[in-house]
Image: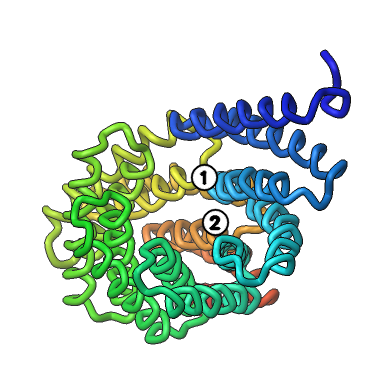
């Protein structure tokens, strides 16, 4: 077979497009490993063409197309370092396009979305300051586009997503009210979009995200009635989405995560409903994780379900078994996703629950030490989310 450099450019571009399509199909089917390999092949081919024609606008756009898909999947499988690097490699490409024509709104939109994606990846790695800075930069660009033409729905949709991601960043830093404010801004935009097109699946899905985020934020703040109200809205929307698209795996995971989060909130208030919700979410998450073993997003939902199962009023052996499974998943994921600040938090949460169940003082002390081992390095590096600080303080005090 001839090398990419010896083939006509049209053939190389067509081959790269085939790899991109194969990657997309594999991703939809839940085969992340194959999808990653196909996206990398497509990117290598397009970068080879761009190296020979660095000022070719079409090739620059084609390279950006693949980088966007690759980085998003790298984030999904827990490779935050690779995702960040992919986004950072893409930034000079889009910057060059914007410099070429600052009035080009398509390129300006792409730059705003890329900054938002990069900011989100940085947040996941624990770089809260850098992630928020990129997200607020993206928001400024997207607000300019919306001000230029408030009728363009895609620009409003982009802005709502950046508001949501910035909300995450503010919660990580402990600024819960600022986070809620950003989530509320996103919700208002999404409600308006959904009112214009009630049958739009993406708009309904985005509404569900906003309600789920608000539910989590209100729960963290301790405003339980608002949290219950928000989770109920998210649950209803996500049940409808799964019913309408039963093969869409992302919808299944999002429903499972809402069932689990809502169930955990209800454990001390409505144990029967909590058990039903957590069991349903846990079953969905198990199926997803089994079908795509390298996808850490599914395993994160599974770990949350196991933690929720351990919180239910069940016999101690059943709770211990759930925690043992959760610990195996979270420990393996932490080893794989070395840049993530999420997984050590799940390890610590699991160990803290093991300490609560332990009757042997030595086992309890060992579990609390494991909490400190998981969280102290994050705290030292300034990467510890505010929601985990109390857990570290508790472990340090030996409670």
Q: Position of residue 102 (x, y in %)?
A: 66, 71
Please determine whether, in this image, residue 177 is positioned above or below residue 21.
below
Q: How many marks?
A: 2
> Considering depth in this image, is 259 or 47 the residue closer to the camera?
47
- In screen coordinates, is 47 left or right of 325? right
Where is residue 300 drawn, in percent x and y? 45, 49
- In this image, 189 relative to 297: left or right? left
> Of the numbered discs in the image, which one, if any, rests on residue 343?
2
Give left or right: position of 33 versus 244.
Answer: right
- Asked if one can make out residue 398 in the rendered structure from this viewpoint, the answer is no
Nearer to me, 222 or 212: 212
Q: Residues within 10 Å of mark 1 (few under 14, many from 20)?
A: many
Badge 2 element? helix
Q: Which residue is mark 1?
A: 296
**SS of the residue under disc 1:** helix
Q: Is residue 196 visible?
A: yes
Contact between labelled residues 2 and 1, with CB atoms less than 8 Å apart: yes
The location of residue 322, given as percent across then percent down, is 37, 45
In this view, 76 is above or below 368 = above
Looking at the picture, how far across and down is residue 183, in whole percent?
36, 75
Quadrant for the C terminus in the image: bottom left
Residue at point 39%, 35% (across, down): 288
- Farthest-out residue, top: 1
In the image, 314 versus 240, the foreground residue is: 240
Please tell me how crowded label 2 is: few (under 14), some (14-19), or many (20+) other residues with Cα within 10 Å: many
Q: Residue at 68% across / 34% down in the picture?
A: 42
Q: Say which residue appears at 32% left-offset and 44% top-offset.
A: 251
The mark that comes first in sequence, 1 or 2, is 1
Please name whichever residue, 52 or 395, is drawn nearer the observer in this view of the structure: 52
Is 358 above or below relative to 216? Answer: above
Q: Residue at x 63, y 54 (%)?
A: 80
């Amino acid at each position: 077979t001839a090398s990419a450099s010896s083939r006509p450019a049209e053939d190389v571009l067509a081959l790269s497009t085939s790899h991109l399509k194969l990657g997309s199909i594999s991703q939809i089917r839940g085969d992340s490993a194959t999808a990653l390999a196909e996206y990398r092949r497509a990117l290598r081919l397009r970068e080879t063409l761009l190296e020979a024609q660095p000022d070719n606008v079409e090739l620059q756009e084609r390279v950006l197309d693949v980088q966007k898909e690759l980085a998003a999947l790298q984030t999904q499988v827990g490779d935050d370092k690779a995702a960040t690097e992919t986004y950072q490699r893409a930034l000079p490409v889009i910057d060059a396009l914007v410099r070429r024509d600052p009035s080009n709104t398509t390129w300006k939109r792409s730059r705003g979305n890329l900054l938002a994606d990069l900011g989100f990846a940085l947040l996941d790695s624990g770089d809260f300051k850098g992630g928020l800075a990129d997200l607020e930069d993206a928001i400024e660009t997207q607000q300019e586009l919306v001000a230029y033409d408030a009728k363009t729905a895609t620009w409003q949709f982009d802005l709502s997503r950046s508001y949501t991601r910035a909300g995450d960043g503010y919660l990580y830093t402990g600024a819960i009210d600022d986070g809620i404010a950003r989530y509320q801004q996103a919700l208002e935009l999404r409600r308006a979009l959904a009112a214009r097109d009630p049958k739009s699946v993406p708009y309904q899905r985005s509404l569900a995200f906003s309600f789920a985020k608000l539910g989590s934020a209100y729960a963290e703040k301790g405003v339980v009635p608002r949290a219950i109200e928000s989770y109920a809205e998210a649950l209803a929307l996500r049940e409808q989405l799964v019913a309408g698209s039963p093969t869409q795996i992302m919808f299944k995971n999002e429903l499972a995560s809402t069932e689990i989060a809502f169930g955990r909130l209800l454990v001390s208030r409505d144990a029967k409903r909590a058990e039903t919700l957590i069991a349903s979410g846990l079953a969905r998450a198990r199926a997803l994780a089994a079908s795509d073993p390298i996808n850490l997003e599914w395993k994160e939902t599974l770990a949350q379900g196991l933690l929720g199962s351990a919180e239910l009023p069940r016999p101690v052996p059943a709770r211990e078994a759930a925690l043992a499974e959760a610990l195996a998943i979270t420990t393996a994921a932490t080893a794989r996703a070395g840049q993530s600040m999420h997984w050590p938090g799940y390890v610590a949460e699991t160990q803290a629950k093991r300490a609560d169940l332990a009757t042997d003082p030595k086992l309890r002390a060992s579990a609390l030490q494991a909490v400190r081992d998981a969280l102290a390095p994050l705290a030292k590096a300034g990467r510890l989310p505010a929601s985990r600080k109390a857990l570290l303080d508790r472990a340090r005090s030996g409670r």
